[in-house]
Amino acid sequence: MTLAVLAVAPLCLPALGGALGGQVTTLFIYCILALGLNVMVGYTGLVHLGIASFFGIGAYLLAILTVPMYPFQIGFLPATAVAVLATAGIGLALGAPTLRLRGDYLAIVTLGFGEVAKVTLRNLEQITGGMKGLNPVPPPGAGVTIGGLDLGKEFAIDPRWFYYLALASLAGVVLLMRRLEGSRLGRALVAVREDELAAQAMGISATKVKLSAFAMSSAVAGLAGCLYAASLSTTADPNAYDFNRSIMVLCAVILGGLGSIPGTLLGVAILVGFDTVLAPWADSWIQQWNINPTGSSLLSFSGWRLAIFGLALVLVMRYRPAGLIPSRRMAAELHDAPEGH
Amino acid sequence: MADARRDSAANPAARNQSGKKAASASSSPLLDLEGITVRFGGLVAVSDLELDVEEGSIVSLIGPNGAGKTTAFNCVSGIYSPTSGSVRFRGKRLERAFTPGTILKALAVGLLTGLLFAAAAVDLDRLWMAVVKRGMITGEPFTASGAMERLRGYFRAELAIDQMAGKWRVVSADGSDVLAIKRDLALARLVRDGLQAKVTAWRTGPGTVPDASDLATTGDAAAASVVLPPVKDEVLDRLAAGKSRIRFRGWAGLFAGMLLGTTGTLAVWQRGRRSPHVVARAGISRTFQNIRLFSNMSVLENVLVGLDRTIPGGVLAMLLRTPANRRGEAEAKRRALAALDFVGLSGNANRIAGQLPYGDQRRLEIARALATGAQLLLLDEPAAGMNPSETGDLAGLIERIRASGVTVLLIEHHMNVVMRVSDRVAVLDHGTKIAEGTPAEVRRDEKVIEAYLGGEA
């Protein structure tokens, strides 16, 4: 239902053809990223503070494989496939040696990895262009013509093409996550979160399960990174993939409800939507009415964004500690808490 | 065989026959503990424990608190490794086998680590510049063979040409030394060749420095007229040493990485050799003294986790929902419901496990353990906290489990359960086995009475 509304929306709302369309597209991309993080944090209960690094690695891999500066230029779809597989591989490489860590220790390792990845991207100047980043990343479908329609040009002109591409990717990821939840692996992930020793005693290899979580999480984040770089037509600089972004996505997942797909989507819609859609809109409104002629940050909406952001988190944690839309399992846990503990 | 056994969890009567037959046929014990000793620092939890469990029997392990019963269980189920002694199941040690695959996997990880180290040692950034970027500047099409040639050139530390502000520069392989700047590409190439010959000669021996006339022998008329820019001796030294330096770095990185990666993988493999999941897959399953259910999952899901291995297909099959995967899921669900029915929890399938009453949680743990297809079930105080009527039901359940062909090793404090169901009873006290025999024998044993009631001091 929601999908149908979102699919029809651009046709009815002309605003989505403009800047707003681009902002909503970014929102969809963050939703994909958050769903990827949810595999690790929500289902498997492994704290991951470096998801943005995989987002960045995906973006850079896509850029390396498509920018005119390098000889590869293999096109958006093959490049995305390669980037997703490669980020999954990097996720495995990070996961394999760190699997025996739990809780805080794993959080520190992923945090460290995020910083290492950022600095590496910045310092491999010959490969990644350092602080300049790689650009221009050609739009998806560049050079592809279907029925007289130059897809590359269409993507460049009309943000609705990207809107649909991001929406379709998001729908695909949601479908895969649904299937994961109901599958053998999904149960194994949750079982490892609930009680690792008991899961092992049932013949489940915790190592394999956690590695799968690492790989899936990284791959989905890599996909989000590919879409992000293509939609901006640049990788932006490595600082765009820093700790702040990881924390923002993690907050969105926690706010919405750990392990819950609709919760994660809502969390992103609120936190990231606030940042990318509402704040610019309110700012332009303030400017339009000339409320803030001196440009004081106290009177601009985005000057207050971190305060509002924090307040929202505090309120949610106070009144709905399991998140806005808790997963069925988490809801049970909290319901059970008064008698069980 | 395993499938047949699981199926019959639903109708134990049919199993009764084959279970008994298997028991009488086998001569060696199903589980064989030999001289198991477990020390935690200076504390001896279990000392030199010998225990045989015959297939199809119910053996109880009893003793006062702290006697080492659960420690012995943890040894069997792979949670602890015994300090000394061996656990054999069907005559085999419960360890992951050391196969050629183990070595191959370790070598693959080692190779990957080695490549990573080597990439860092030879400076991946400059390597990329030399191989990819220099291939783009001359306007010639980028080919794989050209890239390979430049890759080799980098590791031979050959002089190369790059572009800066519209001019062609002759540079060292890593781009750190600029030797000449020319407007014309063809001229820059000639200078490069000439300088390269000079560097090569500098490396191979003194006194063989070629001048322009040497180049004429290549047959290129233009080469003869090229005037080579002067190069300082120390720069020549550096350039000449470049080849061995880059090669040494590459090999050293590769070797160090491979050594670390391979030995590390093997070390971790060795430590995880006796992990609980290996034991569980071999056919030993257990319940825990302090119930360890997946308390936020539904009752059905708990049992399905036990059936995990019966469902075919990898990640892709699960995400695509292939027919085989769907059939596997449906079949697993049917078996899970049968297992719940077997322990008397039918009708509770969709409840959250953590919300079940205590006794039901214990029974769910048994259903989950049985679902793994275990041939040996370890029950750690299943009757703890149960009232007399529940205890009676539990004894009945244990007997039905045995009747379905599963051997049971039991830790229990409720003596009426132990005496009713056990074929043999072993008594532990302070980590040592003080008695073993039929329930009747053990009951009369003086050492046992002393352990439980205290000796006359």
Image (spheres, coloured by chain):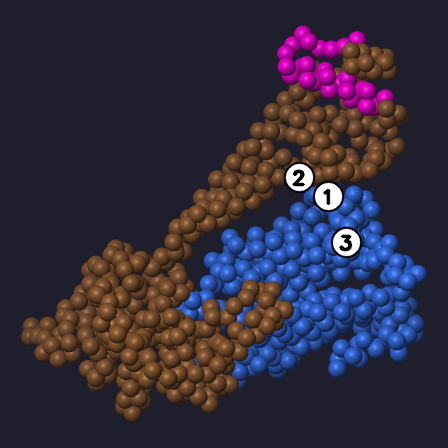
Chain colours: A blue, B brown
Q: Of the residues shown, which amino acid type is indicated by label 3?
A: Thr
Q: Are labels 2 and 3 on one chain?
A: no
Cα distance, mark 1 to mark 3? 12 Å
Range of magenta residues: B187-214
Q: Of the residues shown, which amino acid type is indicated by label 2?
A: Leu
Residue at image mark 3 = A235
Badge 3: residue crowd in 10 Å (few <14, some 14–19, many ≥20): many
Residue at 85% across, 36% down:
B139
Which SS class for mark 3?
loop
| Chain letter behind tag 3 | A
- Given contact means CB atoms under 8 Å apart, are the residues at marks 2 and 1 in contact? yes
Cα distance, mark 2 to mark 3? 20 Å
Residue at 58% across, 32% down:
B249
| Chain letter behind tag 1 | A
**Is the magenta region chiefly helix, strand or loop?**
helix
Residue at image mark 2 = B124
